Image: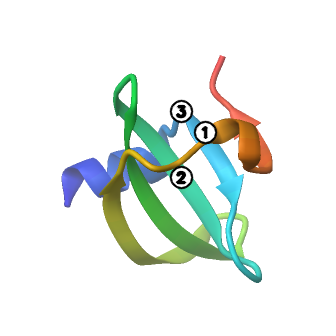
Amino acid sequence: MDDVLDAVETPDFIIKGYRDALIALKTIRQDKFLAVVYKETVPTDGFIITAFFSSKIKLEREVILWKNK
């Protein structure tokens, strides 16, 4: 649970999900991410829909909304 919250609070990337959902990505290793799908109800609040590990996310195909420098 701590890893999921950390991914939303300090993601490496935020990509566009379906409808109004956002997907926070935290890099686990070069080809693997912890992906957390969530929605923001207001800028300071929201809720998590689901979280999963994935090695199938190709960032070059995604709409990147935010990237950690």
Secondary structure at badge 1 equals: strand
What is the quadrant of residue 22 in the picture? bottom right
Reply above or below: 11 against 5.
above
The amino acid on which the numbered mark 1 sits, given as a three-letter code, is Phe
Looking at this rendering, what residue extends furthest in the left direction? Answer: 1
C-alpha gap between disc 3 and disc 2: 8 Å
Q: How many marks?
A: 3
**Could you tell me residue 36's position as x and y percent?**
44, 61
Q: Which mark is residue 48?
A: none
Residue drawn 21% across the image and 52% down it: 2
The amino acid on which the numbered mark 2 sits, given as a three-letter code, is Ala
Residue on which disc 2 sits: 24
**Could you tell me residue 9's position as x and y percent?**
47, 46
The disc, 3 or 2, on the residue closer to the chain's N-terminal end is 3
The disc, 1 or 2, on the residue closer to the chain's N-terminal end is 1
What is the quadrant of residue 64 in the picture? top right
C-alpha gap between disc 1 and disc 3: 4 Å
Q: Which mark is residue 13?
A: 1
* Disc 3 residue crowd, few under 14, some 14–19, many 20+, Cα 10 Å: some
- Relative side of 61 to 45, left or right: right
- Relative side of 58 to 19, left or right: left
Quadrant in the picture for the C terminus? top right
- Relative side of 64 to 38, left or right: right
Residue on which disc 3 sits: 12
C-alpha gap between disc 1 and disc 2: 6 Å
